[in-house]
Image (cartoon, rainbow, N blue to C red):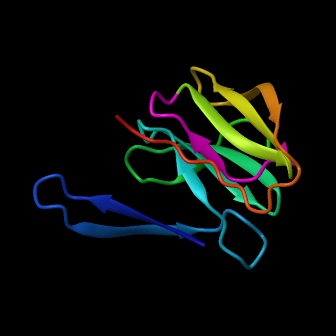
Amino acid sequence: MLGAFRINPNDGSLAQGSNFALCSLAVDYPITFTPSGKYAYASCGGTLSQFSVDEVTGVFVPNGPDLPSVGGITMDSSGKFGFAFTDVDTVTKFVVGPDGTLSPDSGLVLSTSMLGQSIVSTHR
């Protein structure tokens, strides 16, 4: 279940918006936003769903096809690219289109001897 909140720009207080389900599974999965906050990507059981975010209500609107075999995605600070594990040993680069939809671009196979893996983006 995802809860939407509005942030008061003057004092930072939160106002409750609506709640809605993104995933039929009874577990929480990561949600990643583009730096602009206009688009969101939610991982649910190995499938990544794409959404645009309504500026007024914060409600997620489906935006593009679900991407199977994609875990949580990490955005670069420009918001032009995303990176996700698409297999236990493969990181795939996705290009973020002007409408916020993701397109797979290229992949990098990592060492299969790695036990734990994560992708981190730093901001400068």
Residue at 73% across, 65% down: 23
| 111 relative to 72, above or below | above
Q: Residue furthest front?
A: 113
Q: Answer above or below: position of 110 versus 31.
A: above
Please report the bounds of the magenta region as a residue range.
Answer: 67-79
Image position, residue 46 (x, y; %): 82, 57
Is 116 in front, or is 21?
A: 116
Name the residue rendered at 43%, 42% in the picture: 37
Taking the image as shown, residue 50 lies to the left or right of residue 40, namely right
Query: Which residue: 77% across, 35% down?
Result: 92
Identify the residue at image location x=66%, y=54%.
Answer: 118
- Residue 23 lies in the magenta stretch: no
> Could you say where residue 25 lies in the image, as x and y percent from the top left?
78, 73
**Is 20 positioned to the left or the right of 24 in the image?**
left
Residue 73 among magenta residues: yes
Would you place residue 106 above or below residue 52 in this image?
A: above
The answer to whether 106 appears left or right of 27 in the picture is right
